[in-house]
Image: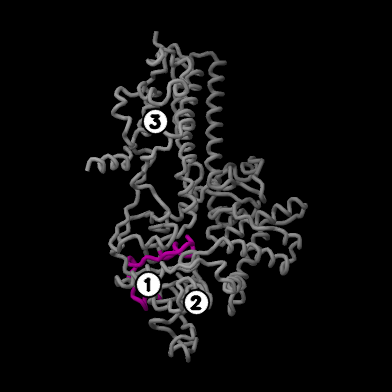
Amino acid sequence: DMTVHCPVCKCSIVDGLRLLGKHGYNEILDLLHPDPAKLQNTPVKRAASITMYIAYLRDGLVHTRSVRYLQQLQARYDLARDLCLKDPVQSTSANARRYFRPTARDIFPNTEVQLSKVRTYGLDLDYTLASYTEKLPETIYTMIRDVLVNSMLYPPALKALKYDRTFAIRGISYDRETGWLFKLDSNYNIAMDTIHYGREPLRDLEEVFALHGGPHLAPDYVKNHLYQLNDMYSVPEATLLADIIQYFSEHDITFHPRYLAEDIRAAGEYIHRGDGISASPLHAMIMSNIGDYLNRAPELLHILESLKREGKRLFLLTNSGYKYVDAVLSYMFNTSEWRDVFDVAIVSARKPGWYLSHRPFRLVPTNSGAKTASVQPWEQVDRFEDGQVYTGGNLASFTNITGYADRSVLYIGDHVYSDLRDPSIQKGWFTGAIVSELKHELSVGQSSEYLRYVRYIQLIEKTLKLSQQETRSQPFIQLPAGDKEAFRQLLEAGRMERRRTRWKLRDLYNPHFGSVFRTSKNASLFSTKVQAYSNLYTADLANLGAYPSDYIFYPKRKTQAHECQVPEVDDLLDQILKIT
């Protein structure tokens, strides 16, 4: 008799295998480990128990001649569910990542960066130096909506639309041919559970296959037909796109998705830039009620002054105009002398064109100092003076005038393309990305609910992999056709459980588009670009103040699919720290 019996009550394990429900966690350890005393109080208890569970399946303790395949697979599903979802104490070990648990105060490296070799820090303004309140995206949504109605003949009823800050996320794409909003992964595959037409999920996914032959989009299609919504300003634009499409659909109004996107983009450009001479409508709105839109940040001024005392050079490079920059930084730093902290201040830069253009620099009249009292804006600029502000220019002229060495510059901004791509490619600058969404992403990713679902879906996937392999065995091949079909149906039930768990993980981040950084299995396209064009990324510029000037950032080693798994280093380090 090859049947395995429970050593606790002598019942047949293979008949039920609902061990946790009958005996409890510690007794299961007795079944799976010859010396549970060695395991009970270690920080790797949880990881070891799952490892033993997989070994338990692989070693064939329940795979005997007297066990039916259906019972075995169902038992595996049940035990995976029990291990991950019905034992919250064990599935959220207090020891997990005790020493290196990431927080929103951390800076995360994509490459090795030695701060001692950084001589010059460059900074963007919006969503980098300046931290805005939730009122800004609502105002952007409202202003663009009103421009569409008042100046572009859109239905007056659209003025009833209200901004929903829970709908869109940064990094999604708008298809100007279909009107779909969706998220792409790193390989240009559509995350099928994120496709929306208006505010509704796309119900008939066969439309995707009919148009593209599958979820993959060709690079030419991405280039010519997708509008990438990659900065914080584009989040309210994405929401407005969805809301107007929803309104048009409900009222049977025909439209072309490309024209709608172009109109919203044109309205967005207008409120951001205005006529190019006076303050833009959006900047004028913010300056009139600056306390409603901006958070004060005197600690940032202290960090910048500390860098200056250490001999670092600082420059400001922003697309915003001088009057707006002056109002924002004076409010944030609680002083009008903000220019003194920067060696060079450049406004109205027109990034990303600034990096490759040939426009000359111009001196900005700031009404500060004897020089600007009689400034002639058409004068040629061939050097930068302390306390002055400049407009326009280009990267080549900037490098020639300042002499800043390429690999000694760290430029920090929030926009992957406008701020970070060209300086990293053209000049080899170190770059840092401000991704404020990290605060929410880390909060969700470290919640007990998220950790339970992640462990559960990984166990389900391993169970499916092992069980699928068994269908190639000779005993399975000899089973009656009806039994084999029933087994395959049970495999499909496991795949459906996997899909449901993926949806739950998505909804923890955002019920429409999920995580900013990933799809169900792969990195999102936005995350891939952050990795490609930034050496460092963090949630807040103020985090820089927590690191000494000689700090070295070491990137996390990434394991590829063909490489062997290694023990969790953090768990091993936990043991070392206990001993030493």
Q: Are marks 2 and 3 in contact (CB under 8 Å)?
A: no
10 Å neighbourhood of mark 3: few (<14), some, or many (≥20)? some
* SS type, badge 1: strand
Comparing 218 with 376, the one in front is: 376
- Residue type, label 1: Leu
The percent position of residue 346, horizontal first and vertical second, equals: 45, 76
Q: Which is nearer the N-term, disc 1 or disc 3? A: 3
> N-terminal of the two: label 2 or label 1?
1
Instruction: Locate residue 316, reporting x and y percent.
Output: 43, 72
Direction from residue 233 to residue 249 in the image, left or right? right
Disc number at residue 314?
A: 1
Is 496 drawn above or below residue 95 in the view shown?
above
Among the two numbered marks 2 and 3 on one chain, the one whose residue lies closer to the N terminus: 3
Secondary structure category for the residue under label 2: helix
Q: Nearer the viewer, residue 539 or 63?
A: 539
Q: Which label belongs to residue 238?
A: none
Tell me where residue 86 appears, x and y as whole percent.
Answer: 48, 30
Please name the amino acid that badge 3 sits on: Ile
Q: Is residue 199 left or right of residue 465?
A: right
Q: Secondary structure at mark 3?
A: helix
Three-letter amino acid code at disc 2?
A: Asp
Q: Tell me if mark 2 has few (under 14), some (14-19) or many (20+) residues whose alpha carbon lies within 10 angstroms of its own.
A: some
Question: Magenta stretch?
Answer: 398-423
Q: Residue 326: which disc?
A: 2
User: Compared with residue 120, is residue 184 higher up or lower down, i.e. above or below?
Assistant: above
Farthest top residue?
1
The C terminus: image quadrant = top left
Asked if residue 186 can be seen in this view, the reply is: no
Disc 2 from disc 3: Cα separation:
57 Å
Residue highlighted by disc 3 = 50
